[in-house]
Image (tube, grey):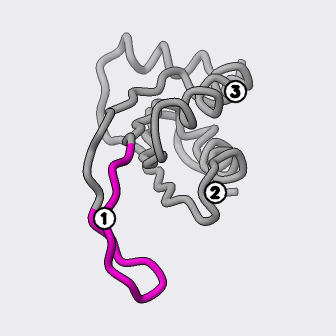
Amino acid sequence: MTLREPGPALIWCPFPDVESARPVLNRMLDEKLIACANMLESMISLFAWRGERDQARETGVLLKTNTNLLDQAVARLAELHPYEEPAVVGWACDAAPPGTLAWLAELGR
């Protein structure tokens, strides 16, 4: 686990659809690993997987958390995700207004 300065963080991850994303996201909300998840329905993903090019309709999900929980949230999302090898990426954010910082700081307390 990486030690980071306290602050906002985001996680991006595609899901097969809203129905498969919703229970995972609710679980992460219940476990207080994220403060919010935005589901973007019906995006088209073009990708290379195991040497083959393909495309699929997916639901993109952007999750809001704080840096203190980022590694734990990324690992938990990968564990709960329905894909064999989900594409999960997380990063610390450089800026947010005071209200957002206070909201995200409440996670893990």
Sooner in the amino-acid sequence: mark 2 or mark 3: 2
- The disc labelled 2 sits on which kind of residue? Thr
x, y (%) of residue 8?
44, 33
Q: What kind of element bears circle 3? A: helix
Sooner in the amino-acid sequence: mark 1 or mark 2: 2
Q: Give the residue at x 67% y 52%.
A: 75
**Residue picked out by circle 1:** 55
Which one is in front in this view, the residue at disc 2 or the one at disc 3? Answer: 3
Q: Which residues are magenta?
A: 46-58
Kindly identify which numbered label has been placed on residue 38: none
The image quarter in which residue 96 lies = top left
Residue 69, relative to residue 82: is it above or below?
above
Q: Give the residue at x 57% y 37%.
A: 20
Question: Split into 4 quadrants, where in the image is the N terminus?
Answer: bottom right
**Residue picked out by circle 2:** 2
Circle 1: is it few (<14), some (14-19), or many (20+) Cα within 10 Å?
A: few
- The disc labelled 3 sits on which kind of residue? Arg
**Residue picked out by circle 3:** 27
